[in-house]
Amino acid sequence: MKIYPLLTILLVISLFGLLFFQLFLNSGIEEFDQKKLAPFESNLLNGDSFTSEELKNNSLSLLNVWATWCVGCRLEHSYLMELEKKGISIIGINYKDDKEKAFKWLDQFGDPYSENIFDEKGEVGFLLGVSGAPETFLIKNGDSVVMHHMGVLDEQVWNNKFAPLIDK
Amino acid sequence: MKSFLMILILSSFVNGQDELKIFSFINDLDEKRFYSLQKEVSCPLCEGSSIAGSNAPIAFDIKNKIYEEILLGKSDEEILANLRNIFGEEVTYKPSFENNIFLWLLPFIFFLLILFAARIFLKKND
């Protein structure tokens, strides 16, 4: 007879405990589910063709979505230059942009990209789940996306979100 | 004034290029599906709005994708699963069952708990 109320209380407490626990599980370091990179083919800004297979030449590469109309891209540009100097291979995706403006931008501010995909209509971006610019993907072994960062990439973001994954 | 108006009209053409595309369907059912699917997909860029109520470029791209896939004869669930695959689980308002079993079962757990509590309460009053 007396066991039912006890059982109910125990159940309620354990349920709230579980929910409470999950609350803390989600805060802290941002978890990211690894994903396979969707294979794609596109043209580069210089007119050559490019397939995602070529990413396999590097064990680690960044895919950086940028455009000349994007204010955030201007903000992160100097940090991308720094990363390139550190020897990180960055492949640009020039997203929904104008070719001439893009070349002008690279002349003016410097070119941190080893290749630049010309994604005029945003088709490659759509395949990758890009919703705007700037966005940056960290690709390992050419086919697994270990990080997809939306927004400006600066030193703090790099140290918190990207660097721990690289050392792994 | 006239030139100002001209510029305004011309610039609306430049910016509105995407929006000028009209989604036309031959059959009514597909058209209804097109609009109801839009309400189930959240806009990844603008929090708190579905793509139906958003003018963000990405919202347009997703609408366009839904349109194309409807024309290809894909089912609603296939279309939504594809979008979840690309943009992540949060892109659809209704969470998928396979990945969120606990979430879907929660109401039933609460229901059982209430039954349990009611039973005790009624017994006490007897």
Image (cartoon, coloured by chain):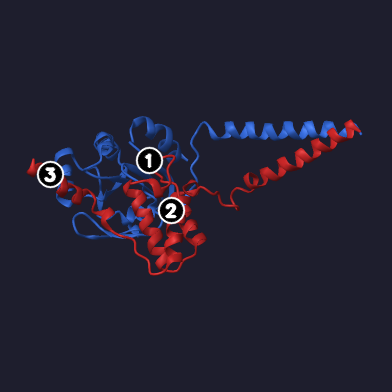
Instruction: Judge by depth and name the residue closer to the eye, B50 or B122.
Output: B122
**In the rendered picture, chain B carries what hue?**
red
Kind of residue at disc 2 = Gln
**What is the quadrant of the N terminus of chain A in the image?**
top right
Name the one closer to the observer, A30 or B57: B57
Residues at marks 2 and 3, CA–CA distance in whole angstroms: 34 Å
Residue located at (46% from left, 55% from top): B36
Q: Which residue in the rendered view is the most extreme toward the front?
A: B1
What is the display colour for chain A? blue
Given this view, does label 2 or label 3 mark the residue nearer the observer? 3
Q: Nearer the viewer, mark 3 or mark 1?
A: 3
**Residue B61 point in image, percent of width and height:** 34, 54
Q: Which residue is mark 2?
A: B38
Q: Is B17 located above or below residue A73 in the figure?
A: below
Percent x, y of residue B50: 43, 46
Q: Using residue B49 as the reference point, say whether residue A48 is left or right of it.
A: left
Query: In x, y percent, where is residue B90?
Result: 49, 46
Q: Earlier in the sequence, mark 2 or mark 3?
A: 3
Disc 1 residue type? Met
**Visible in this render: residue A138?**
no
Mark 2 neighbour class, 10 Å CA radius: few under 14, some 14 to 19, many 20 or more: many
The answer to whether residue B82 of the structure is visible from this angle is yes
Per the image, label 1 sits on a secondary structure element best described as strand
Residue on which the image places disc 3: B5
Q: Nearer the viewer, mark 2 or mark 1?
A: 2
